[in-house]
Image (spheres, helix red, strand yellow):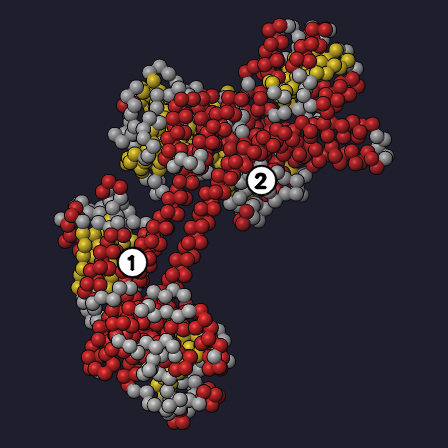
């Protein structure tokens, strides 16, 4: 016993040693198993997430890192074991090429490593000629496997979090590349390069559609290996791109099979700006370890979708730049201002604070010696109440100090254009901004023409408010408006706000160039807002990441708690025995009519309950070894029914048995199996407090390839509420006032130790049916 | 009835057992350590040993093994906090085995059974 405890605690320690890397921990566990059980070699194999291949192995004698392998489920010894989810013994001649060989082994024993219901790996033991692994040894080893399974799970969680960090890094790096102001062509090649590098794709194809103000055509980057298949890949790309452009939704293809040696998977994502399709990006790959190609997954899809969004915005931005350059050439006088404004737009694109963005937007419209407009106001849309709510207003005065257009072009463009918290506060607190905040306009075209900016998603210009009937009179009066323009702010194809600008202080007319500029500018601002939304999504991902890390810590904490629970249970047992024992004596000695008699009785009952709980805690954290013998299943059922018979009678429950005529013998631990059925019967009885039918049937069955038997225990107690169905096997989960919540946890533990399984057929409102399937020979 | 030696390192348990077993008509001696137990066994004849498996700083199982070597006809009932000790091979040397509980009935029955077996 002591030895067993020492072994278990060493395993827990090794599995949780924070100073070692995950593979190093698995390696030391494998080595520890090999030494403790005098085995030639112990190898741990890890199953991929898709349950298709054993993809990594770590032999007890190898280095402290994983060795790659690719063993299909069902192949070799470990692969077969993983597929059958059962113990397996095989000769060394049956090993797969990728399986580890020590050379001295003649036989191998393989054991699946199960994490809850999922098999996450396999452990194989190399046995020398003439040696065997005793049932007791196997059993002990299986007891330790949950620690290995837990370790593998932690490793997967850690992998997932580090992948998420990688993804965030990729997005922020892409963001940096995108925010460089460059002519579209060189910009494009840089974008392609960044996408290609970070996607781990073996070939990346960007397709840009004509007439979008962008250099149209196909832009591709391939690794040498895939260049030979390029024509096939381009055919696939054309097809996928066409589909993506019509649906607007990315496509993920996996497990592609073809005559040629092409990558097995590709992902095609749309590039679009607002409702306009710009093109698509298709990634083929992905390159895994050792140049092998593997499937993209949903996480990749999410990453690429985000990448595509950033790229689309940047491309649209550079298209706008093109337009601006053209426009400026025609309007020579403003060329300097426009180029400068492009810089401002870029600053805005990299500003992720939404609040600052709105200030920058309004300031850019009104700042400088020769501002575009004299006043700018921002309204946000509230669709529910159908109003446009004023948020912020900036005038030439409050924008002053942010002079953008003074000084020489080269000089200013180098200074990052930014705004401090104080400057923003000053703008917010100004009288004009306060008035804007107090303004609410109805979202209704008939009485407020600027609603059209929202409802029709277009620029609205009112040259003279006196001649336009559909303007809000109160608005005109309050701000002394003569003529104004309203432009929609779009993000994610939705109007999120309206910019209203005017020159009413001086009465200067708004020119068509001003309007065209306003249009371009609000496009930029919308993109910036969209970016900022994207970043807040990234922040959410950061939160997820923190949660994942907490999960790991939680897992380690649980292992420690398990150990502690066992030692506390030991400490508590003796005092409980004497408290209860003396209380019993008191109960005996005190005359029954005195109240003290009742007090003693209460202590006795409570202590008995605690004792029951303690022994269950312990039997849960340390399972007693299975004592194998031939058991007669009908005998076991009869014995278990006898234990609960008085409770069944009390509740008025009828028992209906149907046991197959042939004598069904099973190799297992009768005592433990009895425990299984007693627990199930008690649960049934507790569910049918006011009567019902308990039905028990035993019939031959199969489990995988093996002969098995199935015992169905069903009741008419109304079934299990769906919201708790996922929890009922968890230790300590109970809905009963006096339950310990260990009943089903123990049932599950015993059945898995016997190589069997338990299933529930829950019929809410009617009853629950538990089916226990046990192999005749585990 | 019989002269019984209870070996347990917890005084409250020794107290409880001696009270309860005396009430059954036995003569009860107690020892807190293996050494004390050996001394008592040297000094006077004892008919039955009730032994806790876990003594402070020493194992009841070691004492059991020693005793079995020295006086192979002394019946021993092992008491343990939890049933998992049943797996230990040296526990098989004992004549009886009970899991400690505030309900002493199991222990009393076991004493009766072991004594009856001996007297045959
Ligand atoms: N046959 C059943 N019908 C309805 N609910 C059930 C049935 N069996 C189990 N449950 C639900 O699952 C929960 C967990 O069961 P489990 O046997 O693990 O613990 P328990 O019965 O609450 O406590 P204990 O077994 O220690 O008395 C129960 O509290 C109950 O809500
Ligand atoms: Mg129960």
* Inter-mark Cα distance, 1 to 2: 48 Å
Q: For the image shown, how many numbered marks are present on the structure?
A: 2
The numbered mark, 1 or 2, whose residue comes first in the sequence reads: 1
- Report the quarter where the N terminus of chain A lies: top right
SS under mark 2: loop
| Residue found at the far bottom of this picture | A466
How crowded pointer 1 is (Cα within 10 Å; few <14, some 14-19, many 20+) is rated as many
SS under mark 1: helix
How crowded pointer 2 is (Cα within 10 Å; few <14, some 14-19, many 20+) is rated as some
- Horizontal side of A395 relative to A57 (left or right) equals right
* Image position of A554 with respect to A583: above or below: below
Camera-side residue of A477 and A580: A477
Which chain does tag 1 point to?
A
Task: Inspect this view and state whether residue A719 appears.
Answer: yes
Residue A446 drawn at (x, y percent): 43, 86
Give the residue pinned by disc 1: A174
Identified at 42% across, 69% down, the residue is: A420
* Quarter of image, res A595: top right
* Image position of A286 with respect to A540: above or below: above
Which quadrant contains ligand 1? Answer: top right
Residue A145 drawn at (x, y percent): 44, 31
Identified at 44% across, 90% down, the residue is: A480
Give the residue pinned by disc 2: A732
- Report the quarter where the C terminus of chain A lies: top left
Which chain does tag 2 point to?
A
Residue B10 drawn at (x, y percent): 69, 23
Camera-side residue of B60 and A118: B60
* Image position of A160 with respect to A185: above or below: above
Which mark, by number, is residue B101? none
Identified at 72% across, 21% down, the residue is: B14
Identified at 40% across, 89% down, the residue is: A505
């Amino acid at each position: 016993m002591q030895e067993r405890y020492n072994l278990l605690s060493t395993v827990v320690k090794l599995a949780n040693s924070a100073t070692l890397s995950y593979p190093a921990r698995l390696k030391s566990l494998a080595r520890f198993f090999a030494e403790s059980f005098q085995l030639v070699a112990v190898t741990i194999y890890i199953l991929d997430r898709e349950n298709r291949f054993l993809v990594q192995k770590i032999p007890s004698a190898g280095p402290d890192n994983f060795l790659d392998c690719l063993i299909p489920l069902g192949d070799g010894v470990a692969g077969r074991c993983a597929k059958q989810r059962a113990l397996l013994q095989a000769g060394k001649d049956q090993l797969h090429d990728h399986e580890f060989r020590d050379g001295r082994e003649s036989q191998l024993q393989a054991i699946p490593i199960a994490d809850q219901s999922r098999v996450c790996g396999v452990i194989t033991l190399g046995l020398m000629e003439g040696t065997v692994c005793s049932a007791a040894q196997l059993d002990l080893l299986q007891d330790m496997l949950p620690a290995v399974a837990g370790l593998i799970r932690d490793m997967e969680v850690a992998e997932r979090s580090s992948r998420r960090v990688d993804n965030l890094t990729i997005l922020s790096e892409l963001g940096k590349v995108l925010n460089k102001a460059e002519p579209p062509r060189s910009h494009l090649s840089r974008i392609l390069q960044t996408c290609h590098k970070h996607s781990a794709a073996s070939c990346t194809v960007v397709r840009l559609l004509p007439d979008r103000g962008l250099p149209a055509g196909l832009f591709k980057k391939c690794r040498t290996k895939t260049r030979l298949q390029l024509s096939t890949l381009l055919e696939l790309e054309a097809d996928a791109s066409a589909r993506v452009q019509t649906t607007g939704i990315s496509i993920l293809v996996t497990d592609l099979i073809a005559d040629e040696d092409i990558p097995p998977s590709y992902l095609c994502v749309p590039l679009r700006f607002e409702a306009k399709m710009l093109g698509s990006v298709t990634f083929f790959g992905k390159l895994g370890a050792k140049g092998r190609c593997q499937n993209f997954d949903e996480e990749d899809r999410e990453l690429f979708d985000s990448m595509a969004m950033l790229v689309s915005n940047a491309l649209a931005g550079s298209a706008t730049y093109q337009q601006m350059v053209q426009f400026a050439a025609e309007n020579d006088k403003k060329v300097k201002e426009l180029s400068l404004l492009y810089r401002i737009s870029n600053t805005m694109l990299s500003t992720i604070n939404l609040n600052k963005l709105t200030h920058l937007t309004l300031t850019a419209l009104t700042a400088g010696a020769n501002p575009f407009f004299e006043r700018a106001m921002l309204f946000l849309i509230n669709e529910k109440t159908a109003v446009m709510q004023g948020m912020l207003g900036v005038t030439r005065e409050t924008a002053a100090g942010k002079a953008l257009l003074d000084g020489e072009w080269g000089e200013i463009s180098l200074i990052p254009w930014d705004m401090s918290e104080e400057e923003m506060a000053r703008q917010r607190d100004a009288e004009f901004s306060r008035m804007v905040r107090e303004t609410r306009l109805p979202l209704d075209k008939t009485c407020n023409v600027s609603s059209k900016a929202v409802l029709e998603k277009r620029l609205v210009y009112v040259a003279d408010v006196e001649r336009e009937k559909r303007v809000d009179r109160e608005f005109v009066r309050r701000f002394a408006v003569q003529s104004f323009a309203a432009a929609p702010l779009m993000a994610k194809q939705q109007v999120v706000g309206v910019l209203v600008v005017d020159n009413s202080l001086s009465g200067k007319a708004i020119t068509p160039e001003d309007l065209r500029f306003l249009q371009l500018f609000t496009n930029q601002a919308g993109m910036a807002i969209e970016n900022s939304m994207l970043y807040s999504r990234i922040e959410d991902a950061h939160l997820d990441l923190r949660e994942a890390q907490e999960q790991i810590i939680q897992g380690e904490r649980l292992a420690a708690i398990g150990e502690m629970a066992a030692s506390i249970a030991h400490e508590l047992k003796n005092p409980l025995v004497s408290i209860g024992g003396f209380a019993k004596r008191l109960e005996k000695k005190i005359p029954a009519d005195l109240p003290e008699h009742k007090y003693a009785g209460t202590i006795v009952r409570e202590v008995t309950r605690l004792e029951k709980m303690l022994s269950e805690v312990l039997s849960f954290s340390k399972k007693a070894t299975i004592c194998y013998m031939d058991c007669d299943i009908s005998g076991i059922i009869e014995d278990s029914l006898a234990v609960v018979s008085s409770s069944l009678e009390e509740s008025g429950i009828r028992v209906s048995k149907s046991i197959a005529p042939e004598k069904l013998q099973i190799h297992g631990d009768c005592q433990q199996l009895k425990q299984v059925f007693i627990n199930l019967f008690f649960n049934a009885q507790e569910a049918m407090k006011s009567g019902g039918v308990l039905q028990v049937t035993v019939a031959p069955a199969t489990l995988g390839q093996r002969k098995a038997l199935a015992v169905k225990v069903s009741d008419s107690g109304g079934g299990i509420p769906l919201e708790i169905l996922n929890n009922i096997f968890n230790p300590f989960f109970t809905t009963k006032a006096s339950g310990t919540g260990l009943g089903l946890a123990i049932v599950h533990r015993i059945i898995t130790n016997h190589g069997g399984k338990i299933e529930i057929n829950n019929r809410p409102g009617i009853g629950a049916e538990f089916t226990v399937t046990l192999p005749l020979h585990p | 009835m019989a002269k019984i030696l209870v070996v347990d390192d917890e005084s409250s348990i020794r107290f409880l057992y001696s009270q309860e077993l005396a009430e059954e008509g036995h003569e009860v001696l107690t020892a807190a350590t293996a050494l004390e137990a050996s001394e008592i066994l040297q000094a006077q004849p004892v008919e039955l040993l009730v032994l806790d498996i876990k003594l402070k700083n020493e194992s009841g199982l070691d004492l059991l093994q020693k005793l079995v070597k020295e006086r192979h006809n002394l019946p021993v009932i092992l008491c343990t906090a939890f049933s998992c000790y049943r797996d230990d091979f040296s526990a098989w040397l004992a004549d009886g085995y009970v899991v400690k509980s505030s309900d002493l009935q199991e222990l009393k029955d076991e004493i009766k059974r072991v004594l009856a077996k001996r007297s045959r």
